[in-house]
Image (cartoon, rainbow, N blue to C red):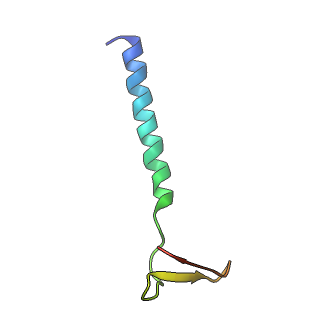
Amino acid sequence: MSKEQTLMKLSAILIAALLSITSVAAFSHSGGTDSKGCHRNHKTNDYHCH
């Protein structure tokens, strides 16, 4: 395997790892929703749906 192929493989693994780590932050929080699937954030007084 050439040096260039090794570097490309390492880059792909690094990008995949970064994407999997940052996607964890995209999960919504649990519970506390009304019948429409919405709730109010009492800290910001924002009403939003999931």
Residue ranking furthest to the left = 1
Q: Nearer the viewer, residue 1 or 23?
A: 23
Residue at image location 41% in from the left, 22% down from the top: 8
Residue at image location 48% in from the left, 72% down from the top: 29
Label count reads 0
Instruction: Reply above or below: 4 against 11.
Output: above
Quarter of the image with the N terminus is top left
Instruction: Reply above or below: 47 against 21.
Output: below
Question: Residue 38 location in percent, x, y?
Answer: 49, 81
Residue ranking furthest to the bottom = 35
> Which quadrant would residue 35 be assigned to in this image?
bottom left
Question: Residue 27 location in percent, x, y?
Answer: 46, 63
> Which quadrant would residue 10 be assigned to in this image?
top left
Residue ranking furthest to the top = 2
Residue at image location 38% in from the left, 19% down from the top: 6
Question: Residue 13 location in percent, x, y?
Answer: 40, 33
Q: Nearer the viewer, residue 22 or 48?
A: 48
Residue ranking furthest to the front = 36
